Amino acid sequence: MAKFIIQGNKKLKGEISVNGAKNAALKIIAASLLSEDKIIIKNVPDIEEINRLLELCQSVGSSFARENGEIEMQTKDIKQTDLDADLVKKIRAAVLLIGPMLIRNGEVRLPHPGGCAIGQRPIDIFIDGFRKFGAEVIENQDHYHFRAEKLKGMTFIFPKISVTATEVLMMTATLAEGKTILKNAACEPEIPALAEYLNRCGAKIEGAGTHTIVIEGVKKLSANIYEVIPDRVEAGSFAILGALCGDPIRVTNCRPDHLEALWSTFDKMGVDYELGKDWVEVCQTQKVKSVDVVTHEYPGFITDLQQPFTVLLTQAEGISLVHETIFEGRLFYTDKLKQMGANIIMCDPHRVIVNGPSKLFGRHLESPDLRAGFALILAGLIAEGETQIDNIYQIDRGYEKIEERLQNLGADIKRV
Ligand code: EPU
């Protein structure tokens, strides 16, 4: 099994470019199944999560060609009603296919996607939403069976803000009969990006990016060209890298306006950074101050940056509280930072206290999930000595060729 070996304690310098957003590309790929036409998707990252979704789409009838970050994809017919259980277990984003498959085939069987390292991740909101569209949903021992002759517009109030459930119900509503109103919807930038694309294909969506989305169903959607927006999690991850060891690091091809909560937290800590329209330059700052962070839906502090940010907090002077409000299992990786020398106390599964600054030391560790895996890379880069990270498939799920991009900044990181 591949692993990363990092020799730490080095300053890094140069430019690192941000790829297309994983969490936007996944949704566009799934939305392409709403139409029989050919879509061209540009700026698609070459990462495991995307590869798995493409495999899943292929298994139900999609064909695609891929070159230099561009995917040409078409789903003339959906040939399956059953989604492959092995693939669904690997990729939770499989839930994105429920809507298109139900609309085009009247039926879909989704094997239980199960929980994952960051929490239980139930799909109750999706099920309630589809029932409101008029679908019949039966839960069997090993799968959910969705069935509907036709879907009808409805009003749905999300009991809790959910990014993917908002996207799934929004895309399904584009082809449901009549008007759908989604209230307490998520506002993450990937949602208006998806709505903008669907509207170019003939959908009638208003309000995406706010908490109320109104969709007037249409009979048919065409397909179009879509360029994936820059990945705000990558941009933030690299900016945090700059704050830890940048001499300086310039993060390019990004949307700094999607990360306002990170910049205001940097301000409180005294991090040395400068923002441009599509770049941010960050320098390692001595004596950054501790700060409390609470993860929150957009535009609050994003849960996907909580892990890299906690590494920065291990280097801040004083006590910081990290309150993870979105997922119940997203702080257990802090045990691994403790093994490296960080002074972290877990109060409960949602809260840790970080007492900094602490010198970190290289260790042999395993990546528990994608974002925690990147946090371990960051910790390894600033630690004294050698860090080995196993289970890097988790990191490859979301960061393309990360070792090569870090090597370009002068990092001593190898994939072996
Ligand atoms: N939830 C339910 N029931 C549901 C759906 C969600 O209880 O039916 C709960 C979740 O368990 C969680 C909360 O609602 O406690 C919010 O989860 P949400 O549904 O918003 O998360 P998601 O859509 O599954 C996306 C990203 C995640 C990111 C979260 C939060 C994708 C493919 N994934 O997940 O990204 O952390 O939103 O912003 O868009 C990552 O990239 O590493 C990643 C995990």
Image (cartoon, rainbow, N blue to C red):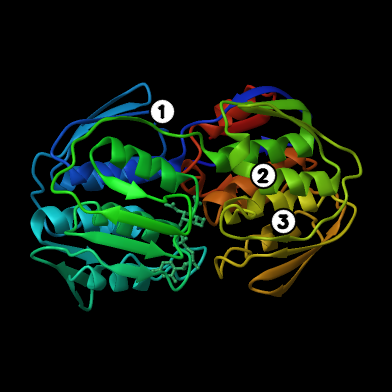
User: Do labels 1 and 3 touch, CB within 8 Å?
Assistant: no
Amino acid type shown at disc 2? Glu
Secondary structure beneath disc 3? helix
Q: Which residue is more in the foreground, 170 or 230? A: 170
Residue 387 is situated, as x and y percent measured from the top left of the image, at 68, 44
Of badges 1 and 2, the one in the foreground is 2
In what element is the residue under mark 1? loop
Q: Is mark 2 on a helix, strand or loop?
A: helix
Q: How crowded is mark 3: few (under 14 residues within 10 Å), some or many (20 or more)?
A: many
Look at 86% across and 56% down and name the residue there: 356
Query: Looking at the image, is mark 1 or mark 2 earlier in the sequence?
Result: 1
Residue 46 rendering spot, x and y as whole percentages: 40, 33
Amino acid on which disc 3 is placed = Leu
x%, y% of residue 215? 30, 54
Q: Gap between marks 3 and 2, in whole Å?
A: 26 Å
Residue 346 in the image: above or below residue 249: below
Circle 2 crowding by C-alpha within 10 Å: few under 14, some 14–19, many from 20:
some
Marks 1 and 2 sit apart, C-alpha to C-alpha, by 23 Å
Left or right: where does residue 335 sit relative to residue 1? right
- Amino acid type, callout 1: Asn
Identify the residue under disc 2. 260
Q: First in sequence: mark 3 or mark 2?
A: 2
Asked if disc 2 is less than 8 Å from ligand 1, the answer is no
Residue of label 3 = 337
Which of marks 3 and 1 precedes in the sequence?
A: 1
